[in-house]
Amino acid sequence: MQVSRYDTEDTDQNVGQANPCSIPVGSIGTMQKPSAAGAEPAAARMLKLCSSLSLVPYLLAAAYALKLGARGETYDTQPQNRNKELFVAGLATFYTAFLVFAAGVRFLLLSLIIYTPGTVLFVMSRREQGRRLFSPPELVILAIAVIGFVAGIVALATGAITI
């Protein structure tokens, strides 16, 4: 039986030689530093994408609260709360719009790539209910989403943004 140099104990002959069956200590289950300049670990990218995905619904919810406060539609029983809630909704809308801006165009476009195909489900739901597909404000939001979707796909295809 022939013994390879890796099967022997550490001697002067094989000290410093790489063992092809060994795993470097500390390399399992740890996040490695990025190897290329400007690169970031996949977990950090996914965390940023997940965070930016939550911003669009927050912005729309805050804007809807602002709309309700401005029109006074839901303040029949407690009109005294309207001004306070209008202020809070305005502040929330401003702050969330700032967060969307701060997240950057890259993550906004990636969010629109993920959200826009969901419009098909919205249309199917409206048809089942026999309701009008889109109101004029919804058409504006849809147009912005579709433009962002197309811009995001083009940016991904050309390499202008990456996932």
Image: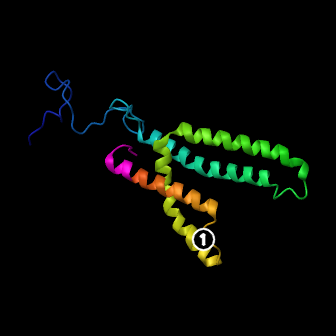
Residue 8: which quarter of the image? top left
* Residue under the point 63% across and 73% down: 132
* Residue under the point 48% across and 44% down: 107
Residue 14: which quarter of the image? top left
- Residue 5 in sight here: yes
> SS at mark 1?
loop
Task: Please provide percent x and percent y for residue 20.
Answer: 21, 38
Task: Please provide percent x and percent y for residue 112.
Answer: 50, 53
Residue under label 1, please give it: 133
Instruction: Specify start and end residues of the magenta stretch as a single range.
Output: 154-163
Q: Taking 159 as reference, is 113 above or below it?
A: below
111 relative to 92 in the view: left or right: left
95 relative to 35 in the view: left or right: right
The answer to if 29 sits in the magenta stretch is: no
The answer to if 158 sits in the magenta stretch is: yes
Task: Please provide percent x and percent y for residue 95.
Answer: 66, 39
- Residue 115 in sight here: no
147 relative to 127 in the view: left or right: left
Task: Please provide percent x and percent y for residue 37.
Answer: 34, 29
89 relative to 134 in the view: left or right: right
Could you tell me the amino acid type at mark 1?
Leu
Residue 159: which quarter of the image? top left
